[in-house]
Image (cartoon, rainbow, N blue to C red):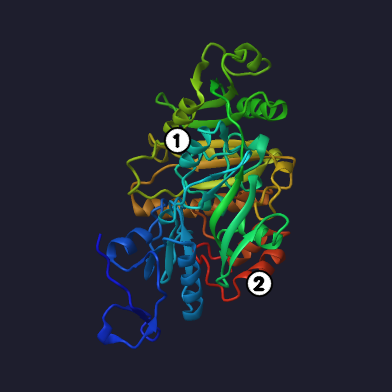
Amino acid sequence: MNHTHVLGFDPSGRSWVTDRSALPAVKTPELDGVLRIDETALKAAAQDFGNLRHHPPIAVLEPDSYEDVVRMVNFAREQGIKIGGRGSGHTSFGQSQVEGGIVVRMSALNKPPVFGSDRVEVSSGMLWLQVLAATLEHGLRPPVLTQTDYLSVGGTLSVGGMDGGSYRYGVQVDNVLELLVVTGEGRLETCSPSRLPELFNAVLAGLGQCGIILRATLRLIPAHTHTLFVQMLYRDLQTMLADHRLMIADGRFDRISAHVMPSSKGGWLHFMNGGCNFTSPALPDKDTLLVGLHHLRGFERISTLTYSEYIEQSRQDNDVFTGRSHLPHPWFNMYLPDSAVDQFVAGVFADLVETETAADFRTEIYGFNTHLCTRPLFRLPDAPVAFLFNLLGTIPDPISAKETVERNRRYFERARELGGKRYPMNAIPMTQEDWRGHFDPYWEQFANAKRRFDPDKILTPGPGIF
């Protein structure tokens, strides 16, 4: 592919110089990769999965080395240009966009993973499905994936990252051993719990505000060969959530999730998925797994799968939105304390109307033992157990999408009154005061880290935090 070669930057016109006759200008850094200013690259970077906001950058960096990112961050800082990393762009409200700035396409910087006995070092642009495929070859796996595993490592570590096993292992940011990042000062830094811990804690779940993640060293655990998959149907939401609490308490499944979907006969279908991993031939006893549960007997779906087949099935179950990427996705995601989840979710379903429950509409609910979530910027309700409630779907027209975003804001305020916290990739308009409350009681710690590591506030403007 041929690209226009950028020679310099005109600070007065805030534009790139591609013609030598137009020089002098501020010379752009020498790059191993390429700085793209063509319409195709800019248009792709001006949208995300949510398809609700479209903020074009002025350039897209496709780096071929860590030094490329360092050089361009330093250049952006000198010229007062915003800059931010982008993985798969799976945000719902423009969080991964950099209006009038530079987007760093992290997938271009994909180096081979480096393994240790219980860890792996991977590029931030690597997708979690690629990480899993590589680790399984070594008989290992990350403790926590994501329900949608075509997300990038750097992207989910900037937010939190979770799946149905998080009640046992915490979220993805709890399973990171070390990071290589470029700060907003243009410094290449290695950080960990013992080395530059302030930076480490500010980057993990820090929404790209203090550094761009280049590499991450992830904890690994032994991978089993097979999974016993169980799907249980429930009469109502309250019974399902009661069993969800029981499963969190006794840990009978390795991965659990609750779901509510429209029924073709009207009303709602309530069901839970449980996965119990094992190494053949040590097959778990399905009757023991179901003891004490209150699902509708006789409607269970039980199957024995290889672990890879189980992950592929989970991927397909979560790909109901495939083919609708061009439509708006005003998703809503909130963490609620155990004491409030029944009340809040029942209220949401009472609000929903039939026109909003298309075939690709669904909700997901995941329970957490909050003491396992140790990174300070990953905010959860102040309760021993919390639940993530996801309201997912596509909206066919912009007017309805706008109304859904406004509804999300109302739900957010209602959940916040109940002690809830948002998962920050969703479509909820936020003020800086909202963000201050979200990160409380770590707001000052976060703000101090921002001043230290990104003093000119050039990194990742999309969320609108600072």
Asked if residue 344 shows in the view, the reply is no
Farthest residue to the bottom: give it.
24
Amino acid type, label 1: Asn
Tag 1 or tag 2, which sits nearer the N-term?
A: 1
Image point (38%, 60%), residue name = 45
Is 209 or 130 nearer to us in this picture?
Answer: 130
Image point (50%, 68%), residue name = 70
Asked if residue 107 shows in the view, the reply is yes
Up-down: is 332 above or below 431?
A: above
Q: Residue 358 appears in which quarter of the rendering?
A: top left
**Front of the two marks 2 and 1:** 2
Dot 1 corresponds to which residue? Answer: 318
The percent position of residue 266, horizontal first and vertical second, equals 43, 27
Q: Name the quarter where the N terminus is drawn.
A: bottom left
Question: Label 2 crowding class (10 Å Cα cut-off): few <14, some 14-19, many 20+?
Answer: some
Up-down: is 21 above or below 122?
A: below
Q: Left of 200 or right of it: where is 103? A: left
Q: Left of 175 or right of it: where is 319? A: left
Image point (71%, 42%), residue name = 372
Is 204 or 22 nearer to us in this picture?
Answer: 22
Is 58 or 431 nearer to us in this picture?
Answer: 58
The percent position of residue 91, horizontal first and vertical second, equals 47, 53
Q: Name the quarter where the C terminus is drawn.
A: bottom right
Question: Label 1 crowding class (10 Å Cα cut-off): few <14, some 14-19, many 20+?
Answer: some
The percent position of residue 87, horizontal first and vertical second, equals 45, 53
The percent position of residue 334, horizontal first and vertical second, equals 59, 46
Q: Which circle marks residue 452 in the picture?
A: 2
